[in-house]
Amino acid sequence: MTATTQVEAQKPASFDAVIVGAGVAGMYQLYRLRKEGFKVKVYEAGDNVGGTWYWNRYPGARVDSQAYIYQYWFSQELYNEWNWSERFPAQPETERYLNFVADRCDLRKDIEFGTRIESARYDEATQRWTITTSTGETVDARFFITCCGMLSAPLTSTFPGQETFKGQVFHTARWPKEPIDFAGKRVGIVGTGATGIQVIQTIASQVGHLKVFLRTPQYIIPMHNPKYSDADRAEYKARFNELRERVQHTFAGFDYDFEQKPYAELSPAERRQVLQGLWDDGSLALWLSSFQEMFFDPQVNEEISEFVREKMRERLNNPELEAKLIPTSYGFGTHRVPLETNYLEAYLRPNVEIVDVKEAPIECVTPEGVKTADGKLHELDILILATGFDAGTGALTRIDIRGRGGRSLKDDWSRDISTAMGLQVHGYPNMFTTAAPLAPSAALCNMTTCLQQQVDWITDCILYMRRRGLSVIEPTQQFEAQWVAHHDAIANATLVTKTDSWYMGSNVKGKPRRLLSYIGGVGHYRQQCDEVAAKEYEGFELA
């Protein structure tokens, strides 16, 4: 080997773009950039594609966007080739779909699996990113694009003493691929958000005894999940162009929207008719297409909340359970609203017990089980943590990301969570983000809609730079501050910011309080993104 080839061998591999994550966004970002001739590399911590649908394989995991809109829109041929079995498919089917797309588009050849990004540092002299991986590799890229997902940094070390537990501990977002035998076991589950609900309703009939450590009860909507026939599939496939256009302009990226008459213009009977119809639909439509006033007007919110409480009381018909399982301290729609199937009925089983951890919080985990503040030891064989995520920010702050002057994204966001439209961050040139804070994709969206929109915007921006021979893009501090102010003005007018939830970062101690997701609507957000691009990326410095 000559001296020249030795030097070349030591040089890090160089790419136009490095993408973090091979989920819905990362796969599409790879597809778009590679199609335009860019040299791209994806790093994925898992050993296969799928993102959320690779990691979250817990019992009962199921998508709650209708299958026919939880898809990619870049190819009608691809859309027509895949046949969903039901309206809200379970995790294995959604994972198979994403593998099907990866195979059809030959994506795997540019993805390195089983590899995490440890650090990413911007070099102001070269105007490029130096990226190091968990395998010790160092690579160099013009663009650093994060497609890590909004819910991909699980809160796993939640309670003191967890490591001493003699039984099995599972976090729902890191569930093993091998089946777990629940038969005859004493099982405890912590967390009753959307994930906890899916687990509880699924395993209640399988376990010996189930203790649900319940702190915050949830409003729910019963899922209506019919199997699809060939005729059903033909019907939605015929609407490809209509649906593709429709989801881009609604409030939450679904094919339904707030199109009712104003609440005040309807009689009580007419309001009831609307709510009942949406309840019967068995989707998220009651939350995301009933009455917008629900998010702003406390009286309207209370009336809709009471409608849902009434439905829950009918199913429980048990005053003691009603007091524990029906929310009264916050309003419907100000938290994430889960779809469920016989969740409430699980508590009517003799082998299911509620442990009220609002009255007696969990103190620690012992070798035998969970100890609560009232001195009780709840002996368990299996402990399931449905304890959620460091949403929106956690996936990025767990990487050592350094921008101009060595500034740290973790440090910056520990003081104040700030982005420019959830697409870039001032101080971090050429870093693009999807599913980051202050965009609808951080929480309030049918994810395939919002992630594809962000990937398209990022790709179009990079193409614009290539056409003009530009190397660097970064939002100005002023533009970012304007976006944050706009975001906050809309958010603070809603009831959502008055409620503690992961939407507000309230589940992570010390996290700055700000609504993580843009609540101005998917259609309105898209319009603003398009306007910025049409004005040649006004608010961004290009060089």
Image: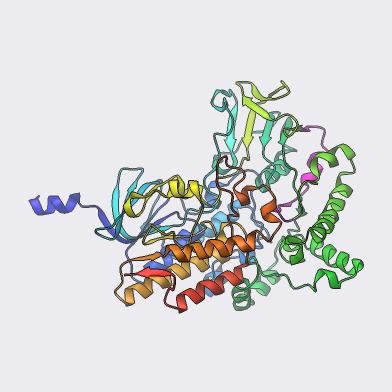
Q: Quadrant of residue 271?
A: bottom right
Q: Which residues are magenta?
A: 333-354
- Residue at screen point 87% across, 37% down: 320
Please state which of residues 360 and 481 is positioned toward the viewer in this rendering: 481
Report the residue at 66% width, 54% height from top: 497
Comparing 37 with 321, the one in front is: 321
Q: Position of residue 123 (x, y in %)?
A: 28, 55
Q: Whole-percent x and y of residue 316?
A: 86, 44
Compared across the picture, whether 349 is left or right of 240 comes to right
Occupied quadrant, residue 58: top right
Q: Is residue 163 magenta?
A: no
Above or below 204: residue 15: below
Residue 229 point in image, percent of width and height:
70, 66
Q: Is residue 322 left or right of residue 45?
A: right
Q: Is residue 24 above or below residue 462?
A: above
Q: Report whether residue 104 is seen.
A: no
Q: Is residue 460 visible?
A: yes
Residue at 72 percent of width and 60 percent of height: 284
Q: Is residue 345 magenta?
A: yes
Residue at far left of view: 2
Location of residue 374 by image quarter: top right
156 sits to left or right of 301: left
For the image shown, how many numbered marks are present on the structure? 0
Position of the C terminus, as image quadrant, is bottom left
Q: Please, which colouring scheme is shown?
A: rainbow
Point out residue 384 in the picture as x, y percentages from the top left corner.
63, 35
276 sits to left or right of 104: right
Q: Is residue 482 above or below residue 463?
A: above
The residue shown at (44%, 73%) is 538
